[in-house]
Each structure stands twice: as C-alpha cells, then as structure tokens.
C-alpha cells in the first residue's frame, strides 16, 4: 500500500489532466450576462435572488423612500425580535443567552423559565459522547483541520443512532438537540488530540460540566485548569448568540435547506452544512482578520500613526501587503452596507475585554482601522453600496483575547450556527415541497461522436 505522502503528491499525469480540464471547462464570462444568469443567486447590484421563505430570521439593510431603495443601519431579527433587544434582555437579567436563543430559533417563541430550564436539562443530558467515541474516533485519526473533524464525527454519530434515517419531526428534534450539545465536545476534543499528537503538547480530555452554559463548557473543556472569568464566559456566550443565525440565504444555511429537501438524514445534512461553513469565503474570515492585524502590527511601528495605517490599508487593496489578495478582511458584507448589527453589539464588549486583558492599545488600532478602511475602499474601489465592519472584524480579536486557538475559530462559528441550521432543517421538513433544484443553461455546443481511431493521439 502506498504511503500517505505518495497519495498526497500531484503527479505529472495529474498535472496533464489538470490542463485538459482547464482547456475544456472554462465558460465565457459574457455568457452569464447573455443568458441573464444570476451568478451566486445574486443580481448584478448584489441583491439576493429570492429562493425561499422563512420565519426564523430577517436581515434588514435598506428601506424604501419615494420608491427607491435607500441603505440603512443594519438590523437582524430572530423570529421577529431585534437582536439588540434579545441581547439586552438576557444581559440585564444576568443570564447566558445562547440556550435561550437556540430555543427561540428552533421553536419560534421565547421560552418561559420552566421551558428554558427543561431545554437546558435536555442539552446537559445529551452533553456526552458514546462510550469509547473519543478513543476510537477522535484520538485515532487526529486532523489539523477541526472542521473536518467535526464533519467526520457528525457522520460517525449516525452509526450510534438506532433511528438515523427517521425524518419524523420529533426524531429530528432529538438529533438536533444532541448535536447542539456535543458540537463543543467534538471540536475541543478534536483540537486536544491534534495539539497532542501533532504539536507534542499534553493531552487533556476534561469531562463536560454537569451544569453550566455552552460557553462555560467550551472554556472549561479547553483550558488545562478549567478556569475562566465571568466576563470571558459572558462574551463568548454573546459571540455564540450573534453567530447562531443569519437568514436563510447564507451559504451553509441554504445548503441545509437544499440537502434537507432531498429527504436525507440529519447527520448528512449537518455534515454538508459544515463543509459549506468551512470555506474561507464563509466561516473562515475571522482567522484572516487576526492574521492581517498581526502583519499590520509588524509593519507599522506607531499604531497611532493614521497616515501609516491609511497607507497600509491602501497597500492591502492594491495587493501589496499581507496575503496580496487585494482585500481588507473583516470589512464589507454581502447584505449590510452602513453597519452590521452584530459588529455594533460586539464592539461594546470588546473594549471591556481588552481592558481586562491589558490590550487596550490593540483595541484602539482595531477602532482606527474600522474608521479608516471604508474611506480607503471608497477611494480605491468602485462599489455599489457602502462598506462597514462585519462581525468577523471583531470576533477573531475576541477569540484571541480569550486565548482560544485559531484552529477553533471556525468550529466556534459552527458550535453557534448549528442552532440556526437545526431551525432551518425543521422548517424545511415542516413545509417541504419540491426538491430544491435550480436551472442551469447548457452552453456547450453539440458535437458528433468521434471514434477512437480518429482522435488525436
């Protein structure tokens, strides 16, 4: 049997096949306009093509004035409730909000105290993995990519379920509650295995807290001494709430609808959503923000020098700095223009955490970049709408202040978004119609079959 390194090699034969593929698979960009194709299911002005209905969440980025669409401060609603009101509600009462948010998203109403207590008890009941699962599945094949670990483990969980393919609503709810409970365990244990076997660090597999929120469990499972401050747990919980849901049109949630419409099982559905979220255009942006700022700090001696910061941002857009992608990571959003409400909320707590961690100067740098970046983008680019900081701009900084490893940044997104995915899967099942199947226009000319002896040799 060939070694893993041999399997990983791109051979000359494969390179030749690559060239053939490129030669025969390129589509003329003008054809997309000619056939009026909505690339990415979006109009030319960036507006999303309506592909479904949902009651789970709503994103507002504009309003109508005199028959014209005018950009406005971004708003996000969970089941009709403004995200700011939900956050203010649980913070004023001094409780964690993620479990309450998950209940609201999945079941469509704010829980009473007994209902919330019961839901938390359900999560605590399911907050464990099958016997020997950690040893046989997680430890035996550690991966440097925790999103792949999550997807593999989710698919493997179907082998431990006596009714994996039952898509009756009650059974799907059971499976979803189970996955919400165990995502933090799989993600953290997967990281601990990688950190031990690949980085040579000590292996810690802590037992989950019998009581405690999802945020508290993540911190306790990850840290050697299992200790955390109330502010750390509060801000991580807030991040989970803000990432739990974002409309039916985002890539991973739309994937959830598409896959559910085929009638497949919950584990396959969530593995598909994880595969979508893993992509750097979707869930991996906050890592890029942190890496960009690390490069910025190395190249700017004085973090208060706005001229130097302005020049660095210009270099980013011109492909002369950081990864030379021409992007300022964390700035701009497919829907929001004037502001991202999640970033507005998170910003209020980032400064407080930076004070606790002694990183106020770095927070000031983030604030300056947030203020200057839109100006630089307007100077350098022709854009159809405004640009503002998105939630990824600050979330990566929060995770770094919480001393969370970068390998877990995107899995943390998944640990939150599994609540939204669950709600959308349930909604699709309840209102299931036709399988989701958009049309594609074939632009390959018809050809006559060519016998082998007449083909170029």
Image (cartoon, helix red, strand yellow):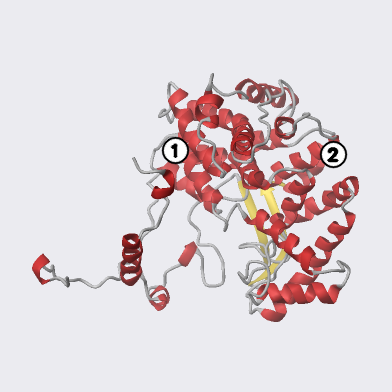
Let me know if residue 169 appears in the view. no
Q: Nearer the viewer, residue 282 or 309?
A: 309
Rendering coords of residue 289 (x, y %): 70, 59
For the residues labelled 2 and 1, the Cα–Cα distance comes to 36 Å
Q: Secondary structure at mark 2?
A: helix
Q: Quadrant of the N terminus?
A: top left
In front here: 218 or 302? 302
Q: Percent x, y for residue 6?
A: 39, 49
Reply above or below: 137 against 440. Answer: above
Q: Are marks 2 and 1 in contact (CB under 8 Å)?
A: no
Q: Is residue 430 left or right of residue 122?
A: left
Can you say whether 379 is above or below 109 in the image? below
Residue at left offset 73%, top offset 51%: 395
Q: Is residue 162 above or below residue 305?
A: above
The percent coordinates of residue 86 (x first, y second) are: 76, 42
The quadrant of the picture occupied by the C terminus is bottom left
Please tell me which of labels 2 and 1 falls first in the chain: 2
Report the disc number at residue 336.
none
How many neighbours does mark 1 have within 10 angstroms: few (below 14), some (14-19), or many (20 or more)? many
Number of numbered discs on residues: 2
Q: Position of residue 440 (x, y in %)?
A: 35, 63
Could you tell whether 152 is left or right of 387 in the image? left
Q: Residue at x 18, y 71 (%)?
A: 447
Find residue 231 and name its label.
2
Q: Within 10 angstroms of label 2, few (less than 14), some, or many (20 or more) residues?
A: few
| Mark 1: secondary structure | helix
Residue 271 visible in the current orientation: yes
Q: Is residue 26 left or right of residue 238?
A: left
Q: Which residue is at the front of the view, 424 or 190?
A: 190
Residue that numbered label 1 is attached to? 268
């Amino acid at each position: 049997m060939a070694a893993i390194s041999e399997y990983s090699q791109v051979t000359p034969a494969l390179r030749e096949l690559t060239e053939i593929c490129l030669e025969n698979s390129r589509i003329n960009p003008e054809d997309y306009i000619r056939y009026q194709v909505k690339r990415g299911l979006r109009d030319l002005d960036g507006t999303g093509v309506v592909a479904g209905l949902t009651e789970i969440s709503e994103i507002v980025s504009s309003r109508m004035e005199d028959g014209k669409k005018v950009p406005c401060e971004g708003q996000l609603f969970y089941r009709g409730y403004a995200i700011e009101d939900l956050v203010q509600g649980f913070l004023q009462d001094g409780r964690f909000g993620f479990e309450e948010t998950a209940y609201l998203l999945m079941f469509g109403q704010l829980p009473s105290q007994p209902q919330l207590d019961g839901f938390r008890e359900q999560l605590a009941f399911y907050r464990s993995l099958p016997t020997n699962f950690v040893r046989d599945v997680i430890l035996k094949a550690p991966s440097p990519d925790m999103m792949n670990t999550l997807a593999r483990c989710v698919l493997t969980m179907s082998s431990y379920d006596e009714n994996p393919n039952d898509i009756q609503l009650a059974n799907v709810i059971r499976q979803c509650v189970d996955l919400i409970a165990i995502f933090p365990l799989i993600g953290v244990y997967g990281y601990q295995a990688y950190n031990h076997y690949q980085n040579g660090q000590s292996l810690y597999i802590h037992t989950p807290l019998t009581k405690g929120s999802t945020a508290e469990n993540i911190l306790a499972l990850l840290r050697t001494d299992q200790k955390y401050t109330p502010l750390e747990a509060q801000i991580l919980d807030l991040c989970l709430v803000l990432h739990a849901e974002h409309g039916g049109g985002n890539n991973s949630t739309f994937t959830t609808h598409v896959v559910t419409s085929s009638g497949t099982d919950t584990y396959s559905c969530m593995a598909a959503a994880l595969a979508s979220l893993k992509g750097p255009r979707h869930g991996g942006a906050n890592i890029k923000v942190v890496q960009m700022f690390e490069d910025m700090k190395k190249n700017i001696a004085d973090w208060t020098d706005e001229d130097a910061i302005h020049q660095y941002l210009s270099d980013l857009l011109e492909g002369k700095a950081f990864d030379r992608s021409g992007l300022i990571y964390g700035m701009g959003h497919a829907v929001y223009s004037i502001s991202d409400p999640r970033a507005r909320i998170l910003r209020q707590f980032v400064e407080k955490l930076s004070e606790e961690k002694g990183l106020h100067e770095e927070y000031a740098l983030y604030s300056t970049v947030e203020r200057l970046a839109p100006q630089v983008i307007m100077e350098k680019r022709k854009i159809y709408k405004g640009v503002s900081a998105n939630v990824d701009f600050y979330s990566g900084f929060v995770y770094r202040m919480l001393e969370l490893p970068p390998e877990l940044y995107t899995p943390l997104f998944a640990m939150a978004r599994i609540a939204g995915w669950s709600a959308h899967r349930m909604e699709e099942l309840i209102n299931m119609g036709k399988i989701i199947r958009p049309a594609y226009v074939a632009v390959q000319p018809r050809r006559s079959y060519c016998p082998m002896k007449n083909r170029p040799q």
